[in-house]
Amino acid sequence: MAPRGTAWHVTRDELERLLAWKLARGRFRPRLQQLVAANSPELVVQHSAAAFRLLPDMYAAVMALCALRGVGPATASAVLAAGAPEVAAFMSEEAVAAVPGLPALQYTIKHYLLYLSRVQERATALSQGSASGLWTPHHVETALWTWAVGRKMCPDLLPNLSPSPVPAEDTRPAKKRRTQAE
């Protein structure tokens, strides 16, 4: 995706390629490809241009893209992360699962915005402590995805960074219950 004059947008062909990339990484849903292909090229350009104009209002931008057939919050997040990585992050299953304290993945706008707020907070914190440059939400999402995939493929190479350690089992003997006979 490249800027076209002063307005960012995606074409239907680009949206179809982006969806193929997304489906290759995650859960395969062949019906989505048919739904996206059913959108007219003009409609895709219109809605995607509107989404980029609405930034940094992520709710409005995602909703503009979700008006297209076959586009939900995860696909919308991929479009926005490709064109505006400084404010958006792709909602991959792996990245969402790697965010400490985040509920199980739900493909909703509410869940995306919660995930994005955590990723944006981390990007800000990393940027403040970094001598090497600015961290964007997209950089954080990519790091989370890489860690999650690496952890899955070679679990012995990466430490377990669970948000909270599993508490040790209580080894004290159980209290005796009083019975009525006592």
Image: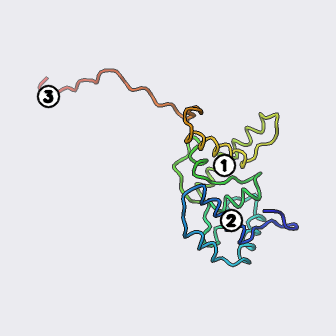
Sequence order check, earlier mark of 3 and 2: 2
Q: From the image, state whether disc 3 or disc 2 is nearer to you.
A: 2
The answer to whether 58 is drawn above or below residue 119 in the figure is below
Q: Residue 167 occupies which quadrant of the picture?
A: top left
The answer to whether 26 is drawn above or below residue 123 in the figure is below
**Tag 3: amino acid:** Gln
Q: Is residue 173 left or right of residue 150?
A: left
Instruction: Provide the residue designation for mark 3.
Output: 180
Instruction: Specify the color scheme.
Output: rainbow
Residue found at the very far left of the displayed protein: 181
- The numbered disc on residue 53 is none
The answer to whether 1 is drawn above or below residue 146 in the figure is below
Q: Give me the residue at 37% from left, 25% from top.
A: 170
Instruction: Provide the residue designation for mark 1.
Output: 117
What secondary structure is marked by label 2?
Answer: helix
Count every numbered label the image shows and give the total. 3
CA distance for labels 1 and 3: 56 Å
Q: Position of residue 176 (x, y in %)?
A: 23, 24
Q: Position of residue 42 (x, y in %)?
A: 74, 78
